[in-house]
Image (tube, grey):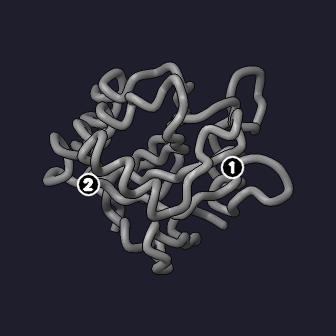
Amino acid sequence: MTSIYDFHAKTLDGKDLDLSTYKGDVLVIVNTASKCGFTNQYEGLQDLHQKFHTKGLRVLGFPCNQFGSQEPGSESEIGAFCQKNYGVEFQMFEKIDVNGAQAHPLYKYLTSEAKGLAGTEAIKWNFTKFLVDKNGKVLKRYAPDVKPQDMVEDIEAQLSVEAKA
């Protein structure tokens, strides 16, 4: 696998989505949870979506129940929660594992490309964020406590870069 475009994932409504759909876009990929201390970051992620969507940013949310069982809901419950509480309009996907033997292949790739503290590949908690450039290259990993608005400078820098042909 050479870029995130080599992967696909199922949306909350069960449709298979090829991530090559996002060629030429800057991506923020984040593992989410509805009952976490960082859940209010949905608001900041939605703000990023609203501010930069027309400029080529796509926020992709991947619910995960691996951290303190903080995402126990079904796909329909997750979607309803995100919409009702945070007005989420960005693309959300089916619940996945981000660590371990059953980790989604996309997350195995993300964590190998952008390691965490002390070179670890494992995701430490909900709302770990990855920034991906317009060519599908993973640029950076952000810890769960990094607020979406603290990513704006990096996002703006990537939005101003031309994608390779």
Return the x and y of residue 80 as percentages of the image width and height.
36, 55
Looking at the picture, does residue 24 appear above or below residue 137? below
Q: Nearer the viewer, residue 122 or 56?
A: 122
Return the x and y of residue 137 as percentages of the image width and height.
51, 52
Could you tell me the amino acid type at mark 1?
Val
Residues packed near mark 2 inside 10 Å, few (<14), some (14 to 19) or many (20 plus)? some
Q: Is residue 127 left or right of residue 97?
A: left
Disc 1 target residue: 98
**Residue at left 78%, top 31%?**
120
How far is disc 2 from disc 1 in space, using C-alphas?
22 Å
**Residue at left 61%, top 38%?**
70
Q: Nearer the viewer, residue 109 or 137?
A: 109
Could you tell me the amino acid type at mark 2?
Glu
Farthest residue to the right: give it. Answer: 101
**Residue at left 64%, top 58%?**
96
Q: Nearer the viewer, residue 78 or 142?
A: 78
Quadrant in the rendering for residue 94: bottom right
**Secondary element at tag 1:** loop
**Secondary element at tag 2:** loop
Return the x and y of residue 55 as percentages of the image width and height.
16, 50
Q: Is residue 158 left or right of residue 1?
A: left
Disc 2 target residue: 89
Q: Is residue 88 left or right of residue 11?
A: left
Return the x and y of residue 40 as percentages of the image width and height.
38, 28
Of callouts 2 and 1, the N-terminal one: 2
**Residue at left 31%, top 54%?**
90
Looking at the picture, does residue 155 appear above or below residue 8? above
Note whether residue 77 is visible: yes
Q: Quadrant of the C terminus?
A: bottom left
Q: Is residue 50 left or right of residue 145?
A: left
* Image mark for residue 155: none
